[in-house]
């Protein structure tokens, strides 16, 4: 006689159990959708960082070559260290974006910086969130070219090449010894912009 209420209680608990399981399943799928979007955004940011750095490094190498070209005229060194040499290396940014499965959307070169925006080639994909299956991620990055050396004073170098004072080393320059001249890494540092530099 006492068993009937127990069966009724069990029958009432079953719909609650189904509701809880369905809710947990929905939450799991929602977390999966968030994870898919985060991975897609992360891929876009990686591509943007790589593109900006690649363009800035190419620019750094050009500036280094330009410095060697005007080595015997120290009065022109200032322009090189201010990034005034000609050149546009957005092609390098596009190359790296493509390698990271993204497309270069914008590239803004400056004398000593590169700002790029990329969009992933792959969308977020199917999820429980409507409309995300064709959504692609777009991210931006800025790379900075920082001079590591101080150009000489205007009256320096009239009789002999002045010493080049750099962050990690002072260079006594010999134009006949190319191997002994500072390289791109000695003249400039390339890094992603911090908030202060943004």
Image: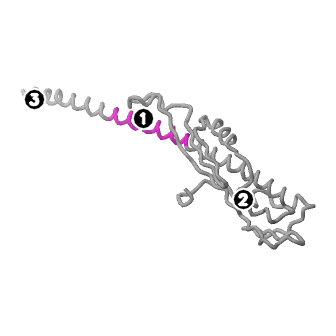
Main SS, magenta residues: helix
- Which of 121/28 is in front? 121
Element type at mark 3:
helix
Quarter of the figure that contains the C terminus = bottom right
Q: Nearer the viewer, mark 1 or mark 2?
A: 2
Which residue corresponds to mark 3?
5
Which residue corresponds to mark 1?
33
**Distance of label 1 from label 3 (alpha carbons):** 43 Å
Q: Mark 1–mark 3 contact, CB under 8 Å?
A: no
For mark 1, does the 10 Å Cα neighbourhood hold few (<14), some (14 to 19), or many (20 or more) residues? some
Q: Is residue 70 above or below residue 57?
A: below
Q: Mark 1–mark 2 contact, CB under 8 Å?
A: no
Specify start and end residues of the magenta stretch as a single range. 24-44
**Distance of label 3 from label 2 (alpha carbons):** 82 Å
Q: Is residue 24 above or below residue 163?
A: above
Labels 1 and 3: the sequence-earlier one? 3
Which residue corresponds to mark 2?
188
């Amino acid at each position: 006689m006492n068993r009937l209420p127990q069966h009724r209680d069990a029958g009432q608990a079953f719909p609650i159990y189904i509701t809880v399981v369905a809710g947990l399943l929905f939450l799991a799928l929602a977390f999966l959708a968030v994870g898919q979007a985060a991975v897609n955004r992360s891929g876009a940011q990686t591509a943007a960082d790589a593109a900006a750095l690649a363009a800035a490094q190419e620019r750094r190498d050009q500036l280094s070559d330009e410095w060697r070209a005007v080595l015997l005229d120290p009065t022109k060194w200032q322009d090189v260290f201010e990034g005034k040499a000609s050149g546009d290396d957005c092609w390098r940014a596009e190359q790296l974006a493509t390698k990271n499965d993204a497309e270069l959307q914008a590239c803004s070169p400056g004398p000593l910086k590169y700002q790029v925006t990329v969009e992933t080639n792959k969308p977020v994909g199917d999820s429980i969130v409507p409309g995300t299956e064709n959504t692609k991620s777009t991210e931006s990055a800025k790379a900075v070219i920082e001079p590591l050396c101080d150009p000489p004073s205007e009256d320096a170098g009239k009789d002999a090449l002045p010493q080049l004072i750099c962050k990690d080393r002072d260079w006594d320059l010999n134009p006949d010894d190319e191997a002994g001249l500072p390289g791109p890494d000695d003249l400039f540092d390339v890094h992603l912009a911090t908030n202060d530099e943004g």
